[in-house]
Image (cartoon, helix red, strand yellow):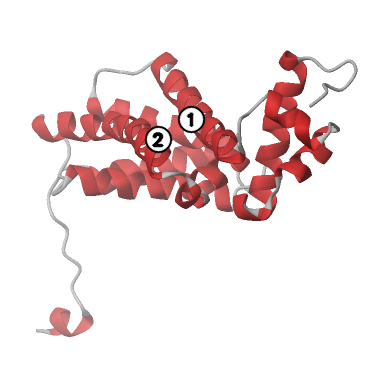
Amino acid sequence: MARKTGSHSDITGPKVREAALRLFAAHGFAAVSMRQIAAEVGVQAGALYLYTPDKQTLLFDLLTSHMEELHAAWAAENKPDDPVKRLDTFARFHIRFHLGRPQEVFISYMELRNLSSENFTKLEVMRRRYEDALESILKAGQAQGQFDVEDTKLTTLALIAMLTGVTNWYRPDGRLSLKRVEAIYADMVGKAVRAGPRQFRHTRSEARV
């Protein structure tokens, strides 16, 4: 397994990860071989094993790196104490962070089934930690009477799914700017959980009674 001339672990290693990310996102984990990844990087297939023991480890490293970056970015975010404002901050942050990483988002959801049971369990712990960050906001708002949420866990999963869905359709050259999309989604998230008087819509038949 000879190393390619001029190749260094701090250069080739990231190239291997970048190539694997592109190929997994484009063709799916199962359809991509180590030989294809090597060809993309420009090294012999055997040389890949200097940087990763196998394809499963490569996938797991990509997914865990994405979650680590997500946790670090959220930890660094300026978060207001007020639950309403904190929820607004979370919604905008989630959209902004994930729109910059469409390939990572795609494999994070589509390739979970290809993780070994051990790796899946480890990644689930990381995912739940992020979900807990949102759920803690909902619980705080609920305790203060600001949010009306029947099930905070279910609502957490629903909101994350809605916010992540932006990556499926948003285009930088589209009708709406990123800031505008953030604002609209943050407003929808707030309205979805906000406590207040119930509004009832009457049908035409009820209105005539």
Marked residue nearer the N-terminal end (1 or 2): 1
Q: Which residue is mark 1?
A: 64
Callout 2 amino acid: Leu
**Image spot of residue 33 (x, y percent):** 70, 48
Question: Helix or strand or loop: what does disc 1 sit on?
Answer: helix
In the displayed structure, does residue 78 sit left or right of residue 133? right
Q: Is residue 34 visible?
A: yes
Q: What is the quadrant of the N terminus in the image? A: top right
In the displayed structure, does residue 3 sit left or right of residue 167? right
The total number of labels drawn is 2
Cα distance in 3D space between marks 1 and 2: 7 Å
Callout 1 amino acid: Thr
Image mark for residue 123: 2
The residue nearer to you, when weighing 95 against 103, is 103
The residue nearer to you, when weighing 175 against 209, is 175
Q: Look at the picture and state if 110 lies above or below 144.
A: below
**Image spot of residue 51 (x, y percent):** 67, 24
The reply to whether the C-beta atoms of the residues labelled 1 and 2 are less than 8 Å apart is yes
The crowding category of the residue bearing disc 1, from other C-alpha atoms within 10 Å (few below 14, some 14 to 19, many at least 20), is: some
Residue drawn at x 16%, y 47% is 151
Residue drawn at x 17%, y 58% is 199
Asked which quadrant contains residue 76, the reply is: top left
In the displayed structure, does residue 150 sit left or right of residue 5? left
The crowding category of the residue bearing disc 2, from other C-alpha atoms within 10 Å (few below 14, some 14 to 19, many at least 20), is: some
The residue nearer to you, when weighing 176 against 15, is 15
Q: What is the quadrant of the C terminus in the image? A: bottom left
In the displayed structure, does residue 29 sit left or right of residue 38? left
Q: Look at the picture and state if 11 lies above or below 52.
A: above
Asked which quadrant contains residue 79, the reply is: top left
